[in-house]
Image (tube, rainbow, N blue to C red):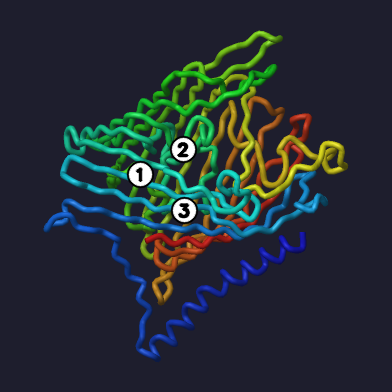
Amino acid sequence: MKCFYKLILLSGLFMAWLPSSANIRDTTEVQNSIPADHSYKPIVLRLNDDGTKYLRLILWHQMWVRSTENNPGTTGFSGEPAANSFDIGLRRSRILAVAQVSPRFLILTHFGINNHTFANGGANNTGNKKPGLFIHDAWTEYAVINEKLHLGAGLHYWNGISRLTNTSTLNMMTLDAPIFNWPTIELTDQFARQYGIYAKGKLGKLDYRMALNKPFAAGSEPVEGRATNKLNDNPALQGYFNFQFLDQESNQLPFMVGTYLGAKEIFNIGLGFHHHAKATASLNQGTEKIHDILLLGADVFYEKPLGKFAISAYSTFYSYNFGPNYIRNVGIMNTGQMPSDNSASYEVMGFNGPGNAQPAIGTGTISYTQLGILLPRFKNETQLMPYLTYSKKNFEIFRQGSNQYDLGINYFINGHNAKITAQYGTRPLYNRSLQWSGNAGEFTIQTHIFL
């Protein structure tokens, strides 16, 4: 626990130091007449003289340093109880290439690694080392009617349900997405992607995307009273419809912006869905029951510059139906270990499991809101953006819903191209009787750079 508080204290001192150090650097730079230059031009290879044909490359790394208050019963690698843990890991490391090879044709390739820690994330047969590089996106697209109708096919990210289900990881306002925004993550999709054909475009102020996908095969034997994924051959249909009242957003790529840092005035309302027939199963007194997956979302996004300030707000509501009592625990970059089933630690372990795992996805409803305020620029053009988030989950399987929040701050050195984020977040704990038993916390510092 001491390590946990020390990391919070050090990060607080560090974030407080940033503005003052910026002023010190400014003074030194003025004295030396060598101003800092953070300007950046995208990596673009022109394929014709006027630049309408091009190849654009994007590269990024997101590094995490964390102190985690572990779930009850967690042990370390020594086998001893571990109430807290400290780790350093790579949340994302990616390369994306997009080419507009003609006014009508586009090709995109996106690959990289995710969630690599000292304990896990390694490629097959290499333990925790040499993480596996894999394809995230690979699709081609044809403009049938420019802007109004584009058709594409491949392993893609043109998702349904909500704006947050289509979020970009390059320009999020928060440290990360809450994960329940990707409800099929790493089961019937490959890191939030599925193979499919999609249509997207703009009809006036209506921005739309729809896809018919072939979900990845994933399933297990059904259990009594609780739905689990079932192997099947059925396609999935999904869509997201977003009415943009004020400034319009680009939909050349599916990745939706988390915050424009006051560069746009946005007011959007969206509705979305995902439907996968006969995708889960449960047992009712030994008889198998088959269920459809139907996932619905509604959201609103608002961003407005206010002089030297800017406000950014997003709120979404999800209604998820995977079948009776469906639930999934998720722990991002979880380094906690499961104790042996005859140990004292195992006796106190609850429903969450070890480390930072929590009930994240299931049948029920979730409401989520985030709010951030972009503060005026310092003399060296850097900025701070404090934010908070609140989640309310009501999963069918539990007797009581949960409330959780994140408090964080971004230090933008060069907008989203170079930033440091510090965040403290909570997660709910449930015991084996499926009752809420309190919350646990996690503190993370992220360094983020993309080119």
What's the distance in space between the residues labelled 2 and 3, CA to CA? 19 Å
Classify 10 Å Cα crowding around label 1: few (below 14), some (14-19), many (20 and above).
Answer: some
Q: Is residue 208 left or right of residue 330?
A: left
Asked if labels 3 and 2 touch by Cβ distance under 8 angstroms, the answer is no
Rendered image quadrant of residue 218: top right
Name the residue that disc number 1 marks. 267
Name the residue that disc number 2 marks. 192
User: Which amino acid, by three-letter code, is at mark 3?
Assistant: Met
Q: Is residue 300 visible?
A: no
What's the distance in space between the residues labelled 1 and 3, CA to CA? 16 Å
Percent of width and height locating residue 415: 40, 63
Please say if 451 is above or below 119: below
Residue at 39 percent of width and 27 percent of height: 213
Residue at 29 percent of width and 42 percent of height: 251
> Of the residues under marks 2 and 1, which one precedes in the sequence?
2
User: Which amino acid, by three-letter code, is at mark 1?
Assistant: Phe
Q: Is residue 276 left or right of residue 285?
A: left
Percent of width and height locating residue 171: 42, 53
Q: Secondary structure at mark 2?
A: loop
Nearer the observer: mark 1 or 3; the answer is 3
Name the residue that disc number 3 marks. 173
> Of the residues under marks 1 and 3, which one precedes in the sequence?
3
State the residue in front, 396 or 372: 396
Please say if 61 is above or below 367: below
Q: Secondary structure at mark 3?
A: loop
